[in-house]
Image (spheres, coloured by chain):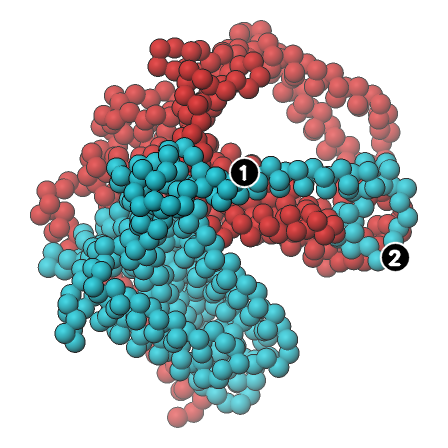
Chain colours: A red, B cyan
Amino acid sequence: MNSRDQSNWSLARAWILQLLVLLGIFLLLAGIASTTLENLDRLGVQSGFDFLEKRAGFDINQTLFAYSSDSPVYMAFAIAIANTVLLAVLSIALSTLIGLLVALCRVSGDRFFNALGHMFIETFRNIPALLQVFFWYFVVLRSLPTSAQSWQLGQHVFLNNRGLFLPGMSWSVSKTGLIGGLALVSVAVLALLLRSYRRRHPGRPSRPAWLKRLAAFFWLLAAALWITQTTAWSQPELQKFGYISDWVITPELGALILGLSLYNASSVAEVIRAGFVAIPKAQWEAARSLGLPVAAIMCTVVVPQAMRIIIPPMTTVYLNIFKATSLGAAVGYPEIVSVMVGTTNNIVGRPVEIMFLIFAVYSLVSLLGIWMMGHVNRRYNRFDLV
Amino acid sequence: MSESSSHTQPSPAASAAQGVSALLNHFWRPALSILGLILIVLLVWPLLQWAVFDAYWAGSDGSACPDKAGACWPFIAERFDQLMYGAYPEAQRWRVNLGLTIGLIMMVPILIPRIAGKAIWVSLFIFVYPLLAIALFSGGVLGLSPVGTSSWGGLFLTLVIGVFAFVFALPSGILLALGRESRTPVIRILAGIWVEIWRSVPTLVVLFVAVIMLPLFLPREYEVDKLLRALIALSILMSCHIAEAVRGALRALPAGQFDATRALGLKRSSAYMHVILPQALNISTPQITNIIIGLFKETSLLVIIGLFDLLGMVQAVSGDPEWHLSSARATGYLFVALIYWAFCFGLSRYSAFLEKHNRTPGSY
């Protein structure tokens, strides 16, 4: 057998192997599908996605947009997704803030701060997130005063064991308000377009810097005016059964934000620290020898380079926080898993379809996160000439 | 801040640490230090006061400590056995102790890097220990009385799930990693889809899939125990994480290693067995240790699907009317937090030690 025959044979073998694997997987899936159908039939479970259109029949205690028990199931699903996103965004913001502070402590070069940061990281990352959420929910937030003895923070913010009651904000845009808003947006868009045009055609005389700053100042003033004119604030009101407000952070949401943020802040801190430590000493030395002040070294030399190292692992951390929002199911926060698996499945009994939807949502978010990471990373790698 | 720090002399050896510390000049540094110290005192002192100075130590029932007061340690003392073993019959607990001790002893040669023959020890642990442990824990053989998994609980359940999930996940994770690096497109794509799908959903969803869907997938004659379902879920998830760790290590190996096996005329399979995999596993051990830490923490989710793991046991016993005190519950949380913390911190130190050990040349 010469070498050509041999390579032909190994090629053929590879093809046969692949076909066999495919056949095996197909048979396995077909077997699972047929048993599942048989089991569903035996249990009298119907199939199909028609349940999404039906009346939900249950209430949700945190709704970011209009929903009642008469709404269809897909609205309940939408509410659950919105609640998940709200929790994820708040937790990501808070954990990034805490993580940044801890990372700065770690790279400060000061022994005391380094120890402080180290202590924080080792404490919070070695205790399960769910235990931390339980601690905040069952111990700390339960021991807050009752409605009648609420703590008042400032003038219009109230804290008690029913939650944190914030002044509600609502937009009411009149016709003139709409025109004003459109004008503001179009001025901003025009300015940005002009800027990018000038960047692409250097050499033309530029406007003086003070004029630009003045224009930006007036634009911000107008925008602030627009916001204050179009928003209406509503204060929390004390009613028979406690405070009522448009914006409430329920104990469930509060406990989850605190638990998830503190737990994940340690990962955020480690990622940021790794990014800073990876910047070679020579970069600092070069920037210093150019006479740049420290703040400028940070903003123009260190941070842009560190970002390239930070972004990929940070995406993983953020996606983990998004996935960890499912812990809401343990304290009754209406996020995707608790609404879909905990409530909807018990009522309509369509486990296969519901699991499919849940997998679809989480996989989509993962893909979106990875795509966004690629996008941002490309931005920071733009100047990479190596 | 930037104005004043711009006057500082450029130091000959500026590093990231010194760069940031330059931001904290002579005024800010002591001010912030004092602030940090105050913060620590404000946080740690009340905790210490609650857990030690104001705590209640004596007593044997719920009347021993008032509600909303210092830590209630009699609660832990009274319920210690439940927190450790769940509802495992008292007369049979020696089996749990024996089984776990054997496991611990078998782990020693795996954990110490200097001891040779890792492959033998690991395969003993993966293929022999589970059989022994199952025989001891659930009984029904060798004259041991059967103990149903519904009475397993507490730290015992957490450890059993953790160890068994790892035992199932390690071989399948390695196979998945090899599958993802396979030259055969079909296997590569299928392994990739499998790993990425499970990794993109939360652990809780994987657990629900096992609890709700697994009985639907199997013919009705097969009744799968809830504990086994949870175990399958965590094994699948963990094997996907391990696959990623091993794949990363396979990618990290210098290309020269592959070339050298070709030059020696080794077959692809024996090249993997004797050259590539041993090195890849060595490189990925610290990361696999981190995955084990993650898994150990994730076992706390079992309480949501109604199993009484360590955290689930605290939830259960503090729901007991006799101990329906917020102080008892808080003490329970503190106690299990310390257990989780000790395990995870110990393992993370071990992982750091391994990483350092691997970096020193000639360690393998």
Reading the image, the residue beneath label 2 is B12
Q: Could you tell me which residue is drawn at 49 percent across and 63 percent down?
A: B347
Mark 2 falls within which chain? B
* Residue B154 location (% of width, % of height): 31, 54
* Rendered location of residue A350, percent (x, y): 21, 40
Q: Secondary structure at mark 1?
A: helix
Q: Residue at x 35, y 79 (%)?
A: B124
In the image, taking residue B40 as reference, residue A132 lies left or right, namely: left
> What's the residue type where badge 2 is placed?
Pro
Write the residue at 56% across / 81% down: B364
Q: Are marks 2 and 1 in contact (CB under 8 Å)?
A: no
Q: What is the secondary structure assignment of the residue under circle 2?
A: loop
Are tags 2 and 1 found on a single chain?
yes
Rendering coords of residue A54 (x, y %): 22, 28
Q: Work out how far the residue at label 2 is from the one at label 1, CA to CA, in angstroms.
A: 45 Å
Q: Nearer the viewer, residue B79 or A283?
A: B79
- Mark nearer the viewer, 2 or 1: 1
Can the viewer see residue A171? no
Left or right of B260 in this view: A304 = right
Residue under label 1: B46
Q: Quadrant of residue A355?
A: top left
